[in-house]
Image (cartoon, rainbow, N blue to C red):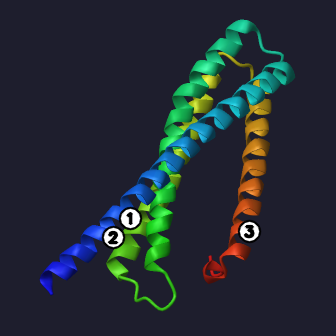
Amino acid sequence: MRTDYLWLIGLMLFWASPAAAQRQRQDSAGAVQADSLRHRIEERFASRVQERLGLTSDQTAKLRATSQTFGARRRELHDRERRLREALSRQLQPGIAAQPDSVARLTDALIELKQQSAQVARDEMKEVARYLNPVQRARLFMMREQFSHRVKQAHGRHWMGRRHKHKDRSWM
């Protein structure tokens, strides 16, 4: 009986390994594709900013460096927010008792993260103010806000499509 059980586990691992390897290849290919798409979008946005703000080549170079520095921070915060929201969603699943201490910690962490994101935005705008005039800075801020709004809309449409495919997640 025990050997049958071990044999069954071995068989499951044998069949799961190729599937897991395939998923891992797809995940890494998806990450490369996402990075490539993000790079193309950032380049297109940068050229529009340069054009609309009438930036000099020196201003463009400084803005690019600032954007890379603060963009990395924003992505890190966004990734952390995504992980926290996923953990909170798992805690708040219908039919499963949430752990109040865990929910409180996750909620507090999300609030703290919002404050950190606001501070990063303030720090970035302070840095940008060193080489852009107030009108350029305001236009940059508005362009980024509009861009962020469009990204959120597109992301929302993506998730709406996924919700219709996965009825069990309709509560999200």
Q: Is residue 60 visible?
A: yes
Q: Nearer the viewer, residue 129 or 61?
A: 61
Q: Position of residue 43 (x, y in %)?
A: 72, 26
Question: Quadrant where the C terminus lies?
Answer: bottom right
Residue position for label 2: 12
Q: Secondary structure at mark 3?
A: helix
Report which quarter residue 90 is drawn in. bottom left
- Name the disc covering residue 15, or none: 1
Q: Earlier in the sequence, mark 3 or mark 1?
A: 1
- Name the disc covering residue 152, or none: none
Amino acid type at circle 2 is Met
Amino acid type at circle 3 is Met
Q: Position of residue 164 (x, y in %)?
A: 73, 75
Q: Is residue 76 left or right of residue 45?
A: left
Question: Quadrant where the N terminus lies?
Answer: bottom left
Is 85 rendered above or below residue 129? below
Report which quarter residue 158 is drawn in. bottom right
Residue for point 72% across, 46% down: 148
Q: Are marks 1 and 2 in contact (CB under 8 Å)?
A: yes
Residue for point 13% across, 83% down: 2
* Badge 1 density bin: few <14, some 14–19, many ≥20, Cα 10 Å: few
